[in-house]
Amino acid sequence: MPTNELEFSTFPNAHYVDLMPYQYGREACEPGHAFGPARRSHFLFHYIISGRGLLMSSDEGGVKSDHRLSEGEGFLIFPNQVNTYVADLDDPWEYIWVEFDGIHVRDELEQAGLTDSSPVYRSLSSELRNRMVEEMRYLISNRDASALHLIGHTYLFFDYLLRSVDHEAEQAPSKIQGFYIREAIDFVKENYQSDISVEDIARRTGLNRSYFGKVFKQATGKSPQQYLIGYRMSKATELLKLTALPVSEVGRAVGYPNQLHFSRAFKGVFGMPPRDWRRENARVTG
C-alpha cells in the first residue's frame, strides 16, 4: 500500500446491539503521522501490518502509559479513553482497523485480558491471528455486502481476536490473589444492577474490607469502589448508545434507583450529564 494512502468505510445499519461494526479501514502512514489526543465513542482495534509506532494512552484512573509497537502487534482503544498514536519516523506503520461495539463486548475483552490499562494485542497463535487479519481485510474489501453478512464476519473477527490474544504477561497477582480478584469481579458483574457496596464485594471473597481493598488495588490499579463505579458507568454508556431507554431506566439498570444520584455519578466520571453524553455519542462517528 503506498505511503499516506487511506481506505475506510462506515457501517450505516445501527439496528443491532449484541455486536456490530461501525467502520473499518487501513492506512499506510507518513513518518511521524499522528492522531490525537482524542476520545472514541466505540471500541477501535488496530492491527499493525508493517512498520512501527507509539501508542500513548490513559486508563480510567488517568494513569498514562506509552507502548512501542511493531509489525504483528495491535492495540485496542476503549470508549472515552484518551489516546494519541504516532507513526515511527524511520519505519512508519501501516495498519488496518475495525471499530465495533456491543452489549457484552467489554466483558469479553476483559476476560481475554484486554483492558484500558493493558491495551496491547500480542498473539499466542499465528494461525488464529492470521484468520483474524483475514476477517479484517474481508470487511474492508466487502463494504457493499448486506448488513447481516458484514455482522457475521465481524463475529468471526471478534472470535479470532479473543482466542488469539496472549495475556500471560498481565497475570501478575499470585494464584490466591487472582482467585480473590476473580471472585470480586464476578460478583460485581453478577450484581452491579443491585444496591451492592464494597463491603458486600469483600464479603464475597471472605476478606475484611481493608485487606481486600489493598489486594484489589495492587492487582487492578483501582480501588474496589472505583472499579464498581467504572463498571456501572461502562454499562450505562452501552445502554445510552445502543438503546432508547429513558435515562431514569438506564440508571436503574446499573444500580441507581435514584436518577439524581445516577446523573451525579455519571457526570463525575464523564464530565457531563447522561442526556448530554447520549446526544454526543449515540450517533455513529468516524
Image (cartoon, rainbow, N blue to C red):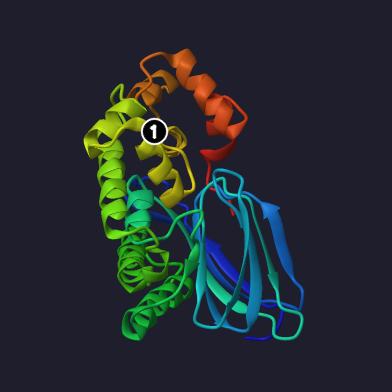
Picture coordinates of residue 10 (x, y %)? 52, 59
Q: How far across and how far down the image is residue 235, in percent?
A: 39, 37
| Amino acid type of the residue tagged 1 in the rendering | Ser
Residue 155 in view in this figure? yes
The residue at the point 42 percent across, 60 percent down is: 114
- Which of 80/138 is in front? 80
Q: Position of residue 55 (x, y in %)?
A: 63, 65
Locate residue 83, reporting x and y percent: 64, 56
Alpha-carbon neighbours of circle 1 within 10 Å: few (<14), some, or many (≥20)?
few
Q: Which residue is drawn at 42% across and 46% down?
A: 14
- Identify the image quadrant of residue 201: top left
Q: In this view, does 184 lie above or below 68?
A: above
Q: Disc count in the image?
A: 1
Q: Is residue 254 visible?
A: no
Residue at 59% x, 54% y is: 286
- Determine whether, in the image, residue 252 is placed left or right of residue 51: left
**What SS does tag 1 mark?**
helix
Determine the image quadrant of residue 217.
top left
Q: Quadrant of the N terminus?
A: bottom right
Residue beneath disc 1: 210
Q: Residue drawn at (41%, 22%), measured in percent from left and top?
A: 246
Up/down of 48 relative to 118, above or below: below
Position of 217 with respect to 5 (left or right) is left
Q: In front: 256, or 3?
A: 256
122 sits to left or right of 69? left
Q: Is residue 230 above or below residue 149?
A: above
